[in-house]
Image: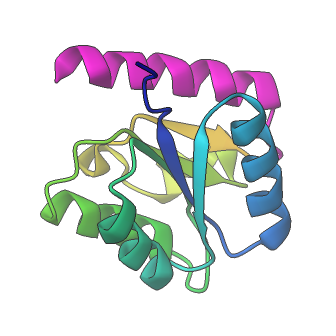
Amino acid sequence: MSEKKPLILCIDDDPDILSFLQLVLEGAGYRYAGAESAEEGLRVYKEVAPDALIVDLMMEEVDSGTGFVRELRLLGNKAPVFMLSSVGDDLSATTDIAPLGLAGIFQKPLARQHLLTVLAAALAEAASAS
């Protein structure tokens, strides 16, 4: 019996970032779903029930990523959510991330190995908690 590979939903308005994430995640054995806006991401989220999400902070609107994450919490999301940001370590200075319940923040440009290591740890933690 083969175990289903985790599905990662990536939401970013930059098609190059989505292509990179798809290449890295599928290359590491994950299943990938992508969306180019928070609105599309919400629709895809409801369709695929991802095991983890990577969400860009600044998409079509400055804080659409945080709005999307708040919406996920209202929907009862239990999957780990990572924020993707070009403001990096300064994110906590510009956005109150504590109430968002994020599993972590990835800085652009993305470091492939760091992304995979952190993602694997969060998925293992989520699996042991359920």
Spot the residue most to the front: 1
Inspect this view and state whether residue 18 appears.
Answer: yes
| Relative to 54, 21 lies left or right | right
Q: In the image, residue 73 lies at what x, y percent?
A: 20, 58
Q: To which quarter of the image does residue 88 belong?
A: top right
| Relative to 63, 1 lies left or right | left
| Relative to 130, 95 lies left or right | right
Inspect this view and state whether residue 108 appears.
Answer: no
Q: Which of 124/89 is in front?
A: 124
Magenta stretch: includes residue 71: no
> Looking at the image, which residue is at 44% across and 32% down?
4
Q: Which residues are magenta?
A: 108-130
Colour option used: rainbow
In this rendering, is residue 12 above or below 19?
below
Q: Which of 31/107 is in front?
A: 31
Q: The C terminus lies in which quarter of the figure?
A: top left
In this rendering, is residue 21 above or below 57?
above
Q: In the image, residue 121 lies at what x, y percent?
A: 48, 16
Majority secondary structure of magenta residues: helix
Q: In the image, residue 91 lies at what x, y percent?
A: 56, 50
Q: Which of 93/51 is in front?
A: 51
Magenta stretch: includes residue 128: yes
Q: In the image, residue 28 lies at what x, y percent?
A: 72, 28
In this rendering, is residue 91 above or below 5?
below
> Looking at the image, which residue is at 24% across and 49% down?
99
| Relative to 55, 1 lies left or right | left
Q: The N terminus lies in which quarter of the figure?
A: top left
In this rendering, is residue 38 above or below 83?
below
